[in-house]
Image (cartoon, helix red, strand yellow):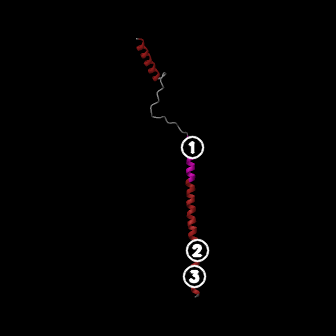
Amino acid sequence: MLKRVIAVIVLLIVAIIAVRLVIGFVSGLLWIVALVALLVAALWAWSTLKSAKQDRAVKKSPAREVAAAPAEDPVAVEMRRITEELERRRSQ
């Protein structure tokens, strides 16, 4: 009977130590994951700040430049031509 009580006590001690080891291992893994995440975040922030310091050149568009507007509105010119033609026909 004494052997069985000692066996139960030994099993309880082993179970407690095993649970503590598992919890310690899992929490250790979580710390490693947290440290890796912090390292990645720090590298990203550093590269973002570093790229902001670089001069940004404005690239010229490969498209043709827009031609300047004519001095006089083409619609107004055409309307004036039509009006003059109508006046000329009336006077004939």
Left or right, 23 with reference to 84: right
43 within the magenta span: yes
Q: Is 82 above or below relative to 58? A: above
Point 58% across, 71% down: residue: 20
Label 3 near label 2: C-beta < 8 Å?
A: no
Q: CA distance from mark 1 to mark 3?
A: 66 Å
Q: Position of residue 77 (x, y in %)?
A: 45, 20
Q: CA distance from mark 2 to mark 1?
A: 52 Å
Which mark sits nearer the N-terminus, 2 or 1?
2
Q: Position of residue 35 (x, y in %)?
A: 57, 58
Q: Amino acid at mark 3?
A: Val
Position of the C terminus, as image quadrant, is: top left
For label 2, the residue is 17
Q: Amino acid at mark 2?
A: Ile
**Mark 1 closeness class: few <14, some 14–19, many ≥20 residues within 10 Å:** few
Point 58% across, 68% down: residue: 24
What secondary structure is found at the residue carrying circle 1?
A: helix
Q: Position of residue 50 (x, y in %)?
A: 57, 45
What secondary structure is found at the residue carrying circle 3?
A: helix
Part of the protein shown in magenta: 41-54
Q: Is 87 above or below relative to 55? A: above
Q: Is 60 above or below relative to 53? A: above
What secondary structure is found at the residue carrying circle 2?
A: helix
Main SS, magenta region, reads helix
Position of the N terminus, as image quadrant, is: bottom right
